[in-house]
Image: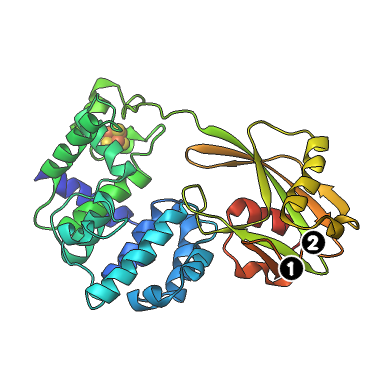
């Protein structure tokens, strides 16, 4: 088929030598796919190498605690993916003798493994003919076939999968999927792709119709929700307080400083006034008499996929920490803060404050 020859030829000439292409090990491919889904290649590679160094095989990941896994994941965001990876590794070790499923269908049954990840592993490691459609491939397919339905709707997605299936090279699914992903990542880029240099220009419907700048169509996502977080870094004799976040909200299982959330921005005075309430609520008043107020940070904006966090940090020196510490509060020596997995927002604050 003409298409296979062109895309494979382009791939052989232009592909990047990536570490995950040096192995067909399903565990390592799985970890690479999950990490690379959420970050740019250059940013993600050091995380991938570190993660695989800490957890070189599925047994080492399964025997780690969730805290250890989250600690390694710190900075990557989307922590539920790390938890799912850990839960599925544990499942494979405990229920499947440590042997990962060797088919698209089997992989799809693992927690957190979606259509793309299952197809990427099954095609690369087992040469199964299933299409791996990530954002890059969706864009390429939508342009090649001039798909005018939004690709983030069920109707548009169905067309993308159908067309991607038609293009699949049954004789070499592994190379085909890698070539499509790489082509979308390097050449058919979201903005102003160099169509004049593209080997597929003659076959591309969007190019023929002059619609490259418009396709793929997408329905706009809802505006992110604003949230206002005020963190209090309580310091006493070289120790501070951390609290592990609970379920059903962002950053589940990660550690953070004591905080209050407000429904609207608070002024400097209000932030200060909340301190006694925060600590008095949790401890006896006598411990607060020697409180010293430190620096209040400027507002920090932290963007998540569906939420915008507006945060400020206030340092509070206390002669004595509340005793006993309230439930969930944990006193941690400042020099041991790096042992705890924290949201990047908190981590950056601590780093910039030299903790
Ligand atoms: S011609 Fe342009 S839009 Fe079409 S596949 Fe090539 S790079 Fe993408």
Colour setup of the view: rainbow
The CA distance from mark 1 to mark 2 is: 9 Å
Q: Position of residue 275 (x, y in %)?
A: 79, 47
Give the structural element (helix, strand or loop) at label 2: strand
Residue appearing at x 50%, y 64% in the figure = 70
Side of 186 where 235 appears, left or right: right
Side of 311 where 31 appears, left or right: left
**Viewer-closest of 126 and 247:** 247
What residue would you read off at disc 1?
334
Q: Position of residue 167 (x, y in %)?
A: 14, 43
Residue appearing at x 52%, y 52% in the figure = 251
**Viewer-closest of 206 and 107:** 107
Ligand 1: quadrant of the figure: top left
Image vertical order of residue 321 relative to residue 205, above or below = below
Q: Position of residue 226 (x, y in %)?
A: 58, 33
Check if mark 1's residue and mark 2's residue have beta carbons within 8 Å. Answer: yes
| Quarter of the rendering containing residue 219 | top left
Q: Is mark 2 within 8 Å of ligand 1?
A: no
Identify the disc placed on residue 176: none
**Viewer-closest of 174 and 114:** 114
Side of 75 where 26 appears, left or right: left
């Amino acid at each position: 088929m003409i298409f296979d020859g062109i895309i494979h030829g382009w791939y052989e000439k232009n592909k990047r030598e990536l570490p995950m292409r040096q192995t067909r090990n399903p565990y390592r491919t799985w970890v690479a796919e999950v990490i690379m889904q959420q970050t740019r290649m250059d940013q993600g590679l050091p995380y991938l190498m570190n993660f695989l160094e800490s957890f070189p095989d599925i047994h080492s990941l399964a025997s780690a605690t969730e805290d250890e896994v989250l600690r390694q994941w710190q900075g990557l965001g989307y922590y539920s993916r790390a938890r799912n990876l850990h839960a599925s590794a544990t499942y494979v070790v405990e229920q499947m003798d440590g042997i990962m499923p060797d088919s698209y269908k089997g992989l799809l049954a693992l927690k957190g493994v979606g259509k793309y990840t299952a197809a990427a592993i099954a095609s690369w490691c087992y040469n199964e003919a299933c299409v791996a459609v990530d954002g890059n491939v969706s864009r390429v397919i939508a342009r090649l076939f001039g798909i005018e339905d939004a690709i983030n709707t069920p109707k548009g997605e169905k067309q993308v999968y159908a067309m991607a299936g038609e293009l699949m090279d049954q004789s070499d699914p592994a190379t085909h999927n890698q070539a499509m992903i790489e082509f979308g990542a390097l050449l058919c880029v979201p903005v102003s792709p160099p169509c004049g240099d593209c080997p597929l220009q003659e076959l591309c419907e969007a190019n023929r119709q002059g619609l490259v700048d418009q396709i793929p169509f997408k329905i706009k996502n809802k505006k992110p929700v604003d949230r206002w977080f005020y963190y209090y870094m309580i310091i006493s004799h070289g120790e501070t307080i951390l609290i592990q976040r609970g379920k059903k909200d962002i950053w589940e299982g990660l550690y953070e400083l004591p905080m209050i959330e407000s429904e609207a921005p608070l002024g400097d005075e209000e932030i200060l006034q909340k301190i006694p309430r925060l600590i008095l609520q949790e401890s006896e008043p006598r411990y607060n008499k020697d409180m010293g107020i430190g620096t209040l940070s400027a507002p920090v904006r932290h963007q998540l996929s569906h939420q915008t966090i507006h945060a400020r940090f206030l340092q509070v020196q206390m002669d004595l920490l509340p005793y006993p510490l309230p439930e969930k509060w944990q006193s941690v020596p400042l020099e041991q803060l790096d042992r705890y997995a924290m949201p990047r927002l908190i981590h950056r604050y601590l780093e910039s404050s030299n903790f």
